[in-house]
Image (cartoon, rainbow, N blue to C red):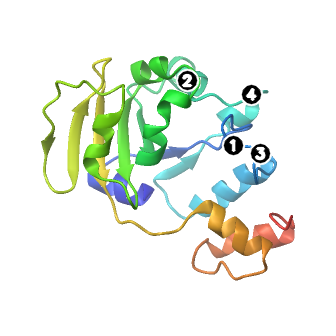
Amino acid sequence: MAEEVREKLSLERIMFIPSCIPPLKTKDVIDAEHRLNMVRLAVSDNEYFLVSDVECRRSGISYTVDTLKILINVEQIHNPLFILGMDSFLELPLWHRPEEIIELADFVIVTRAHHDLHEAMNSPYVKKNTSPSEDTDTLMLELTTGKKALILRCTNLDISASSIRESIRNGRSVRYLLPDNVISYIKENNLYRG
């Protein structure tokens, strides 16, 4: 998905930021160092991808609003695009200080299986008087803060992290679902075995 977004938008780079302690996830969460290492391995062969440990360097729960402020004010990343799936965007009201998040970045929202481009209109953060300009694969919306949300239809692969973890736990193959170097790391560190 990230590569498809990068190509469609001609982005210089995409930064992956594993969370240290994810606030909304409590099941199947392994140590942040392992997750950081696996992301590094997974993207190591793509020159346009980089991994930041900004959340892992902080203690405590990883809140997106704090990370965005660090990226903008400390790392000097101006006008960041926050890439996330439609399911995550629709859950934004549950996040920590969501009103601040939508002030800090423009969004790229990727449709996933079972989501339509127009579902984003249900968000309380999308201006309701927005007339969506659209084609078959994109939809541009304005957020209540004046920031933009570009909805992209990308190739949907019906693969979920939870089903991959379950397969590993049950001893089933995850070949072709993860890069080989990540599969080796999981085996070497005996991860997700319960």
**Three-letter code for the amino acid on which mark 4 is drawn:** Arg
Q: Secondary structure at mark 1?
A: loop
Which mark lies nearer to you, 4 or 2?
2
Of label 2 and label 1, which has the lower sequence position?
1
| Above or below for 177 versus 39 | below
Of label 4 and label 2, which has the lower sequence position?
4
Q: Secondary structure at mark 3?
A: helix
How many residues crowd mark 4 within 10 Å: few (<14), some (14–19), many (20+)? few
**Three-letter code for the amino acid on which mark 3 is drawn:** Ala
Q: Return the mark for residue 65.
A: 2
Q: 47 or 17, which is in the foreground?
A: 17
What is the quadrant of residue 164 in the picture? bottom right
Residue located beneath label 4 in the image: 58
Q: Residue at x 50, y 61 (%)?
A: 46
Q: How many numbered discs, if any?
A: 4
Of label 3 and label 2, which has the lower sequence position?
3
* Coordinates of residue 179 in the picture (x, y in percent): 61, 72
Residue located beneath label 3 in the image: 32
Residue located beneath label 1 in the image: 25
User: What separation in Å lies between label 4 and label 2 (alpha carbons)?
Assistant: 13 Å
Q: Is residue 5 visible?
A: yes
